[in-house]
Image: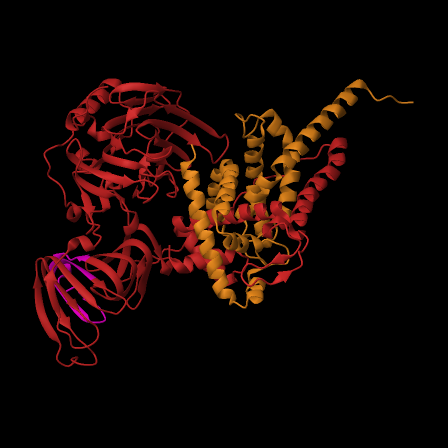
């Protein structure tokens, strides 16, 4: 008969704690990481793949994050730091995936990708504020405009379909949609600029 | 931003962009920071709206089970929130993959795969011989159509055109004529001493070696006789010529009417003439107006200079930036600032070419306003805050590890709490001097920040005692890691200090009047003078400069 030694049990418990902590951080911040990844890709195609690859790599490197060594000596271990840390990994994952996809998909040139990543890093901490500002600005739009803006995100809906339903030309509706987007952006930027 | 770029960005965000359009978009994003910021902001907005739509689910169109289309009133059955569920599933799937992999990790140790892959070194571009008839010698916030397929070459052969979408470029013809082209514009190179301006605006400075330099337009032919002049061609092909200095011969030719007997006339100093492309309307004479044009020659752009009030500066050999609103300011016809000359090189006698710089605003709608009687009765530049989004950006300057900077400014009251960046230095790391304000009083905040690459750090200083919005102030900072100095002073009094973190060294465009991304933190108030050294002055020298500025702008110690 063999016995599992105390040290092995401790190790497994500690490993389980780490696992719970990691999954907790990942689940809480999944949307922010996904958003960062999307900002580096030309379309939503491939986002899920990169999210998975990033999640795996984050787990592999999680001890670095916890111990705060290697490239992240000053890191605390909070949620915001986790997002930033994960996004650094995500950036390299995107670069790596893009090289594989270059033959059959649209991919950004590497230096543009880097510029976009730099912009996206700066926006990480503003995501909640921005989301709040978008909600507030959306609520200020007249009902029809808000409906038009939001309805394209509904399953099965599209500008084309709405245009068909309304007997309007898609092109005209696209223009209207884009105008609304610009108005919304302007409103959001104004609100963000007023934030302390 | 032009309509074409906006359309490309929207098509990309909607997933409807074609490969050729995508290439075009990348060309634009590569060189046009405004476009890149707009793309990022729009994409981010799109994601936020998408998240909100998903979280609202069927509430998007109200609580009703039946969806009524807003435009036609057609009712449709509500579809399940499939996309939202798919997104949630995708997130869970990603985590699930991790979960299933954990067992593997629990039982054995894996060698960590390399995260960072070395980028392939880009092949060095082949440098062609400088055999063209003209070459680009300076670019200011510009987008060139010629570079959209990444075959960028700064030299042009006869028959080639330069199509400038935005901004300003300076082109030098082989014989020496120097042309400043203001976008949007289209200029064809005909020879080493002539060009055809299809549309847009240019100014030309012609040295003796290039006398006889010619600019053709759809309705005119201009032959230089040793001069400086400006030409603009509107969308109808009508041409305006403004002679700033010297003499130009104007030959008008209308192919349909008088081509066989072209008219010729001499235009001298300060004369302007308008020639229609179509019809037989005679050329119309008027006074030349240089302020309608952007001029890049520093020597020629000093429209407001030789004032008596010159600051007594110490350690001039360490001056990196010296902007003084009474000197070297080029304004447009509305009194808005096109460029603000960096006086550092002239003042320090340093031979560093990079100091031959200016702060620019090529976009007419975002230029701050020059005021002759600003702070302490001396000239100032007024920035209008978020409403007008005005700012200036310098040609790239090289910062060293340490710095001392002084800004003479005055806040304007705000209706709500606001932030405004007076000066943003740096690239990846940023050194930001900002106004943090509530109505009638405000404070200066100084921060060193690195938010882009790990380790992410920030150290911020703020004066506790608010400063008045009704008086000019001198805000000064000293920064040196080596000397362990990080200090913020207001009107000669040290109001906050902290620990320096890292070097400021970078070569980048520095921004005056808003955040470095140029889309927020717009400053509302006036700036009269900015002095910056590439070293941390000792306290005594800093006091000396501060004292000089206080006397000059009649500022009392608080």
The one nearer the camera, B151 or A106, is: A106
Residue B340 is drawn in which quadrant? top left
| Residue B311 percent location from the top left of the image | 16, 30
- Residue at 59% across, 43% down: A34
Most common secondary structure along the magenta stretch: strand
User: Is residue B206 a member of the stretch shown in magenta?
Assistant: yes
| Residue A25 falls left or right of residue B435 | right
The one nearer the camera, B377 or B124, is: B377
- Residue at 34% across, 35% down: B415
Number of marks in the rendered image: 0
Residue B166 is drawn in which quadrant? bottom left
| Residue B464 falls left or right of residue B280 | right
Compared with A169, A178 (above or below) is: above
The one nearer the camera, B71 or A92, is: B71
Instruction: Please tell me the colour of chain B.
Output: red
Image quadrant holding the C terminus of chain B, namely: top left
Range drawn in magenta? B204-231
| Residue B462 falls left or right of residue B122 | left
Compared with B557, B101 (above or below) is: below
| Residue B273 percent location from the top left of the image | 13, 65
Q: Residue furthest right?
A: A1
| Residue A71 percent location from the top left of the image | 54, 30
Instruction: Please tell me the colour of chain A.
Output: orange
- Can residue B117 be seen here? The reply is no
């Amino acid at each position: 008969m063999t016995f599992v030694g105390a040290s092995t049990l401790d190790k497994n418990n500690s490993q389980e704690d780490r696992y719970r902590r990691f999954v907790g951080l990942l689940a809480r911040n999944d949307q922010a990481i996904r958003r960062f990844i999307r900002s580096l890709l030309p379309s939503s195609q491939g986002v899920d793949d990169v999210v998975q690859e990033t999640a795996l790599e984050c787990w592999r490197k999680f001890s670095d994050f916890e111990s705060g060594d290697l490239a992240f000596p000053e890191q605390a271990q909070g949620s915001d730091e986790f997002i930033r840390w994960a996004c650094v990994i995500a950036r390299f994952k995107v670069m790596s995936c893009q090289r594989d996809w270059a033959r059959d998909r649209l991919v950004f040139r590497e230096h543009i990708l880097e510029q976009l990543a730099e912009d996206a890093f700066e926006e990480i901490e503003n995501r909640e504020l921005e989301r709040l500002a978008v909600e507030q600005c959306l609520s200020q739009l007249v009902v029809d405009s808000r409906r038009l803006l939001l309805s394209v995100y509904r399953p099965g809906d599209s500008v084309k379909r709405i245009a068909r339903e309304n007997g309007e030309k898609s092109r005209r509706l696209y223009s209207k949609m884009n105008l609304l987007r610009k108005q919304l952006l302007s409103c959001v930027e104004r609100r963000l600029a007023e934030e302390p | 931003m032009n309509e074409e770029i906006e359309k490309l960005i929207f098509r990309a965000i909607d997933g409807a962009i074609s490969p050729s359009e995508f290439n075009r978009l990348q060309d634009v994003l590569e060189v046009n920071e405004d476009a890149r910021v707009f793309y990022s902001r729009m994409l981010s907005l799109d994601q936020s709206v998408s998240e909100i739509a998903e979280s609202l689910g069927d509430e998007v169109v109200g609580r009703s089970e039946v969806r009524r289309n807003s435009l036609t009133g057609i009712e449709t059955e509500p579809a399940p929130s499939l996309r939202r569920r798919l997104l949630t599933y995708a997130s869970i799937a990603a985590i699930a993959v991790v979960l299933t992999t954990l067992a593997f990790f629990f039982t054995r140790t894996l060698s960590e795969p390399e995260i960072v892959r070395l980028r392939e070194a880009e092949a060095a571009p082949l440098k062609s011989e400088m055999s063209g008839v003209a070459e680009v010698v300076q670019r200011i916030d510009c987008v060139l159509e010629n570079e959209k397929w990444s075959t960028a070459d700064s030299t042009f052969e006869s028959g080639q055109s330069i199509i400038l979408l935005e901004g300003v470029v300076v082109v030098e013809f082989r014989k020496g004529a120097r042309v400043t082209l203001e976008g949007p514009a289209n200029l064809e190179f005909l020879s080493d001493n002539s060009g055809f301006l299809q549309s847009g605006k240019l100014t030309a400075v012609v040295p003796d070696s290039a006398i006889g330099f010619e600019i053709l337009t759809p309705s005119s032919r201009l032959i230089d006789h040793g001069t400086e002049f400006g030409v603009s061609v509107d969308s109808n092909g009508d041409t305006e010529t403004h002679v700033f200095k010297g003499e130009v011969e104007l030959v008008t030719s209308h192919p349909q009417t008088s081509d066989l007997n072209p008219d010729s006339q001499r235009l001298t100093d300060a004369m302007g003439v308008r020639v229609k492309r179509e019809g037989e309307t005679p050329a119309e004479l008027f006074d030349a107006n240089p302020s309608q044009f952007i001029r890049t020659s520093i020597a020629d752009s000093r429209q407001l200079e030789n004032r008596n009030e010159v600051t007594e500066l110490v350690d001039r050999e360490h001056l990196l930036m010296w902007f003084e609103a009474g000197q070297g300011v080029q304004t447009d016809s509305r009194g808005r600032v096109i460029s603000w000359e960096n006086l550092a090189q002239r003042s320090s006698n340093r031979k560093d070419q990079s100091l031959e710089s200016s702060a620019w605003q090529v976009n007419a709608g975002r230029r701050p306003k020059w005021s002759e009687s600003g702070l302490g009765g001396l000239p100032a530049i007024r920035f209008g805050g978020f409403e007008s989004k005005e700012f200036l950006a310098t040609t790239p300057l090289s910062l060293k590890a340490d710095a001392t900077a002084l800004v003479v400014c005055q806040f304007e009251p705000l209706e709500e709490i606001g932030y405004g960046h007076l000066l943003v230095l740096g690239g990846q790391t940023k050194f930001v001097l900002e106004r943090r304000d509530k109505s009638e009083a405000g404070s200066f905040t100084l921060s060193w920040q690195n938010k882009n690459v790990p380790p992410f750090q920030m150290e911020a200083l703020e004066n506790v005692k608010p400063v008045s919005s009704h008086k000019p102030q001198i805000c000064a900072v000293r920064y040196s890691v080596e000397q362990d100095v990080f200090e913020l002073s207001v009107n000669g009094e040290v109001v906050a200090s902290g620990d320096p973190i890292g070097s400021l060294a970078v070569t980048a465009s520095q921004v005056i009047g808003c955040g470095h991304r140029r889309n927020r933190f717009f400053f509302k108030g006036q700036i009269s003078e900015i002095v910056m050294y590439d070293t941390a002055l000792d306290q005594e020298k800093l006091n000396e400069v501060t004292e000089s500025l206080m006397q000059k702008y009649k500022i009392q110690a608080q």
